[in-house]
Image: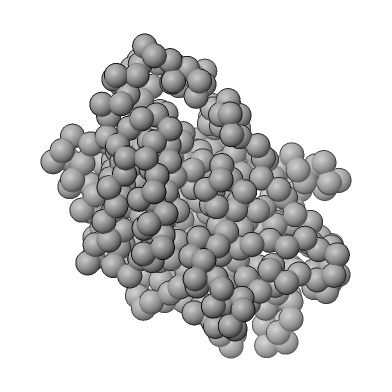
Amino acid sequence: MKEYQASYIRAVKNESVSHKKGPDFLNPEAVAPAYHLHQSFEEYSPTPLVCLKGLTQKLGVKAVFVKDESKRFGLNAFKGLGGLYALTRIICRELGLDETQVTFRELKDPRWKERIESMEFVTATDGNHGKGVAWTASMLGCRAHVYMPAGSSEIRAEAIRGIGNTEVKIMETGYDDTVRYAAEMADKNGWHLVQDTSWKGYEEIPSWIIQGYTTMGEEAVQQLEEAGYKRPTHVFLQAGVGAMAGSIVGYLANRYEENRPVFAVVEPENMACIYQSARMNDGKPHPAVDTGPTMMAGLNCGEPCTVTWPVLRDYVEWYYTCPDYISAYGMRILRVPEKGDNTVISGESGAVTTGLLCALCGDKELGLLKEMAGVDKDAVILLFSTEGDTDPDNYRRIIYEGKNS
């Protein structure tokens, strides 16, 4: 690993990216049941893959695509994919159903109603994951308990409280301690913990959540091919604990095994556990060193997911950190796009990769990083806007008042 500091961006380059086969649990065969389940859901439809031709021209690259997850299941974020699949797997295990073939309609069969409705689920969240768990539980008539870390937006909390039979509580602890509290409550009350991070002894359910996220990757692959592109050359992914980033990296590493894109992970400068783990270069996950505030609530996580850390360690070439104003920059670019481009409503955690890409291409001080990453006229870049305006008040402040945090 080699570390670089260029103005307001820090970067670590992985000089020994693995060329071995992608992770087995994220290959197309292993994740096919998740895609099958999602397609069986009445509200399912692929989210748009937006081609930003005007931005492409401005940046001097071949193509820029943004996967708009604000359109996912009416939840304004992608997290429902993981929650839906994980809850389904838990229920299938309890009822003895075949998880590879089950459809959501089958779970609504009156035969299972009483047993399913007796189940309760619990999670810790900065917002989007908890909303996905509560939404899935409500669709099945179950109760959910959602705990949010100190500093969480009351607007995000209220959005979850409005879903079904859900208890929501904002704690006085940070994210990682709130996760531990949720786990304790699960053990104490016999609830099912549905957490999108992992630790020793708790890896199966996070693996299901991670597999659920790969539906975004499969849709993007198909949509790129429909647009006339065999593959992206670069994939920029934001990371909190690294579950989503690891999901997409692992899946695409398998799909494009013979000619993989350059994978890059982006984190807030004040909460960068994946960056720190890469920087330490001992193969192990490490907590974030700088733990100041960030407006990127979905990325405000100090400890890596142990399931996906090996994926991010082995297959990612670049790890970046950036300040909050880079995310605000990306939000404005997507909200007020170049002439001819469609608008994408992207929240604080959703737009940071767009902001970083535009900074790399537009700031001369970052020119070396851009060149080293191979972002040139032949680059086909895939980004994932993982949420919409999940905090509407802050979104308005950033877009209309010019705030940067």
Name of the residue lying farthest toward the front? 162
Against 5, residue 242 (above or below) is above
Against 257, residue 10 (above or below) is below
Q: Residue at x 61, y 63 (%)?
A: 346
Against 334, residue 147 (above or below) is above
Residue 284, quarter of the rendered image: bottom left
Please give left or right for residue 106 compared with residue 190 in the image.
right
Q: Residue at x 62, y 70 (%)?
A: 331
Q: Is residue 85 visible?
A: yes
> At which x and y percent is residue 157?
36, 58
> At which x and y percent is residue 356?
63, 73
Q: Residue at x 30, y 26 (%)?
A: 117
> At which x and y percent is residue 78?
54, 48
Against 12, residue 108 (above or below) is above
The colour style of the image is: one colour
Name of the residue lying farthest toward the top? 111
Q: How many marks?
A: 0
Residue 136, quarter of the rendered image: top left
Q: Is residue 16 visible?
A: no
Please give left or right for residue 277 compared with residue 39 in the image.
left
> At which x and y percent is residue 50?
75, 54
Which of 366/169 is in front? 169
Name of the residue lying farthest toward the left? 188
Residue 98, quarter of the rendered image: top left
Q: Residue at x 55, y 62 (%)?
A: 389
